[in-house]
Image: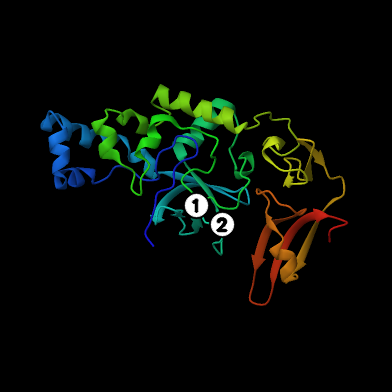
Amino acid sequence: MGCWDVFCFLCGNTCHSANNIYDTFLEDIENYENSKDKNTFEKKIKLVEKNTKWLNNCTFLCANNKVIHGCKEVACNITFRDKKGNTYTTNYNFDGMYGVFTHTDCWKFIKKEYKINLTYSHLPINIHDVTKPKIFNFVKYGPIEKYWEQDFNFIKMILDNNQKLSESPLKNISVAKNIKKIVSKLKIKTDSNRVGPPVSATFYKPNTYKVGTNGNIWQVKVNKWIECKDTINVKLSNPNKNLIKKSVFSGDYNNEPIFILDIKQNKKTTEYDILSIKEFL
């Protein structure tokens, strides 16, 4: 099985720069034929290689709501590693920490524009499969989707004179405006006084559970989040496997009212910090 690209859910770009695409261009004679001015096109390629270096600097939004800056894609475009060597993946079935990536510049733009620290909880993820190119099928990213291939097609982008689509939102007004449209579609809640989950209940089926910003569990009823007043926090050492199988990390949604806040392991025991409701445990 080969590798594939995943794309930033905010700007629609891939998780790596256009490094070495000049060599790819030289290997493909069609690109010479499609380019009216070879020298100008070569200059454009080198400029794109320079202007897309920001794409390498990623931020990983973990399903336990930790935000890890300074990550880089290291394997198959779905595996990321931070500066300490910790590994994260967009694959939900991975035996470790899963989540989604965004570019650090995109994350900074959200913080600057909306005054929030974007986390996994803010996103209306309602499927446990974030390896697909498009996490949110209802969102249209515009012309940049034309270049979504197994390897992002920077060459075709340049031939179409659309290279500015891959510039940072901190420097390009058009990219920034497009991200604001995406945020609107995602219905991200930016109210600092909000106590429920920071995502609209309209994305979820009735009786779905999520953790609110106040630390309690909330349930969807009639397209609204209703707080579960009997939320409890317990620590369990080597708990029943079936119970853990029903659990998800605190930033994710669940069909059962049970969430993992933290996991601590030593030689003899694995301790789970669990958030649930009284009647469930």
Picture coordinates of residue 11, whole percent (x, y):
45, 34
Question: At 40% across and 39% down in the image, what residue appears?
Answer: 13
Residue 223: mark in rendering? none
Report the residue marked by disc 2.
Answer: 92
Residue 131: mark in rendering? 1
User: How much space separates mark 2 and mark 1, taking CA atoms?
Assistant: 8 Å
Kind of residue at disc 1? Thr
Question: At 67% across and 38% down in the image, what residue appears?
Answer: 203
Q: Look at the image and tell me in which quarter the N terminus lies.
A: bottom left
Question: At 56% across and 57% down in the image, what residue appears?
Answer: 92
Q: Are marks 2 and 1 in contact (CB under 8 Å)?
A: yes
User: Closer to the camera, 20 or 201?
Assistant: 201
Picture coordinates of residue 70, whole percent (x, y):
45, 47
Assign a secondary structure to mark 2.
loop
The crowd level at tag 2 (other Cα within 10 Å; few <14, some 14-19, many 20+) is: some
User: Closer to the camera, 25 or 66?
Assistant: 25
Picture coordinates of residue 27, whole percent (x, y):
15, 48
Q: Is residue 68 left or right of residue 278?
A: left
User: Closer to the camera, 269 or 259?
Assistant: 259
The crowd level at tag 1 (other Cα within 10 Å; few <14, some 14-19, many 20+) is: some
Spot the residue most to the bottom: 268
Q: Look at the image and tell me in which quarter the C terminus lies.
A: bottom right
Kind of residue at disc 2? Tyr
Assign a secondary structure to mark 1.
loop
Picture coordinates of residue 5, whole percent (x, y):
40, 49
